[in-house]
Amino acid sequence: MLYFFQPKTSEGVFHLSDDEYQHCVKVLRKKAGDEIGIFDGKGMAYQAVITSITGKLCEFEITQKTQLEPRPFYNHIAIAPTKNTDRIEWFVEKACELGVDEISFVLTDNCERNKMRTERLEKKAVSALKQSKSGFLTRINPMVKLKDFLKADHNGLKFIAVVEPDLPYLSNELKSSQKVITLIGPEGDFSKVEVTEALNQGFQKISLGKSTLRTETAGLMAAHMVNVVNEY
Amino acid sequence: MLYFFQPKTSEGVFHLSDDEYQHCVKVLRKKAGDEIGIFDGKGMAYQAVITSITGKLCEFEITQKTQLEPRPFYNHIAIAPTKNTDRIEWFVEKACELGVDEISFVLTDNCERNKMRTERLEKKAVSALKQSKSGFLTRINPMVKLKDFLKADHNGLKFIAVVEPDLPYLSNELKSSQKVITLIGPEGDFSKVEVTEALNQGFQKISLGKSTLRTETAGLMAAHMVNVVNEY
């Protein structure tokens, strides 16, 4: 079954958005009468039949609903964007494949970029949703200053990955079925002030291992450790 | 300290290869008298001083030797190449960052490519060696038929990642300080015959988790699980 994304199905909107129309009708050449799958990105999976394709509108009728079970844990990665856009996009694609629930971009002292657009990243999240068939869309937050991100009220376990000797290894600090936020710094690492601010907000310093990892790799491995501890 | 790669230093060759010369002299503009670091890729780290740069020859003199400690485990990923070259290169770059010891490419029934060149991949391995400062170069083997790969005499734990319900989760089957080979199939998965052949050669079927992962992502996550179990 080929799945498409339609976030508003629950509100009675039964046609595909432009991007999804392109994929369904123009690329895959689906036509009226064909069966398709629909995800709303919040855990509802629908089976549907295309009823009409008129102009740029592909309408469908839902024949079956399934509520997918959410994961018993929550995996939130807050990461400094890399200078190179490909590396950010790569990170988002892979993090979405792993089923990361939420990605936040944080502007830090040593960031090599201070602006970023998230439209393309949201498209990556949608295509990962369709490819992985998880049914849950990764939430992608626009970039905010680290200070402001830290001030927000985060519950669950809060970690900050820093390069320092003798820090606990992230996966040893995790248990299954927890809400976890992990902060990943830029190539130049977090500044001392930033680390102190994070500690003051209840974040704990951890290590991601002995290898020197690029920012996007560190983000992905932190995300994967949360999956591993949950055997997901 | 900036590191460069010179595999033959141990055999008394004290100049940089073309690529490393380019990076050292043309890109980083190092000159005679400058201190550099040298890796031989087999765990020797040298401190050296550039003695002369003549034509395309950058010679150096070693001032200090350090034997780096090898990791107590061995991480070998045997993977079906993806159709898209970028994805293979991405996998190699990231696997090298994680310190994977050996990467083999295997030609399987459902492979979307039957030829591949490894030169560019070897360059990725060298740049990862320099970036991660691990001192150990990831060994990259040319593509062979899966049948031939399976026939070879592999010791250690042998796993094949397949998409099937109720399989053991890879990281639960691992202990620290082991030699591990993990076979990763193409998008179309291994054929039944291939899986049977692998089982006959002592490979064990395992799962990499509930997400549907692309080939290159599966390969990287399998590699990372071996690191996690070794707290590396």
Image (spheres, coloured by chain):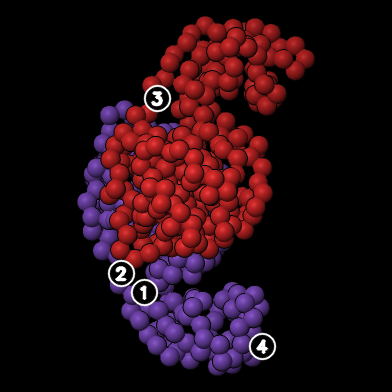
Chain colours: A red, B purple
Q: Which residue is mark 4?
A: B55
Which kind of residue does numbered mark 1 sit on? Gly
Alpha carbon separation for disc pair 4 and 3: 63 Å
Q: Which residue is mark 1?
A: B43
Q: Chain of mark 1?
A: B
Residue A132 seen in this snapshot: yes
Residue B226 seen in this snapshot: no
Left or right for A4, reference B169:
right
Q: Are marks 4 and 2 in contact (CB under 8 Å)?
A: no
Q: Is residue A52 above or below residue A43?
A: above
Q: Chain of mark 2?
A: B
Asked which secondary structure carries label 3, the reply is loop
Which kind of residue does numbered mark 3 sit on? Pro
Which kind of residue does numbered mark 2 sit on? Pro
x and y percentages locating residue B206 in the rendered image: 30, 39
Q: Which residue is mark 3?
A: A70
Q: Is residue A48 above or below residue A118?
A: above
Respond whether the residues carrying marks 3 and 1 are from the same subunit.
no
Respond whether the residues carrying marks 1 and 2 are from the same subunit.
yes
x and y percentages locating residue B83 in the rendered image: 56, 44
Q: Which residue is mark 2?
A: B70
Q: Chain of mark 4?
A: B
Alpha carbon separation for disc pair 1 and 4: 30 Å
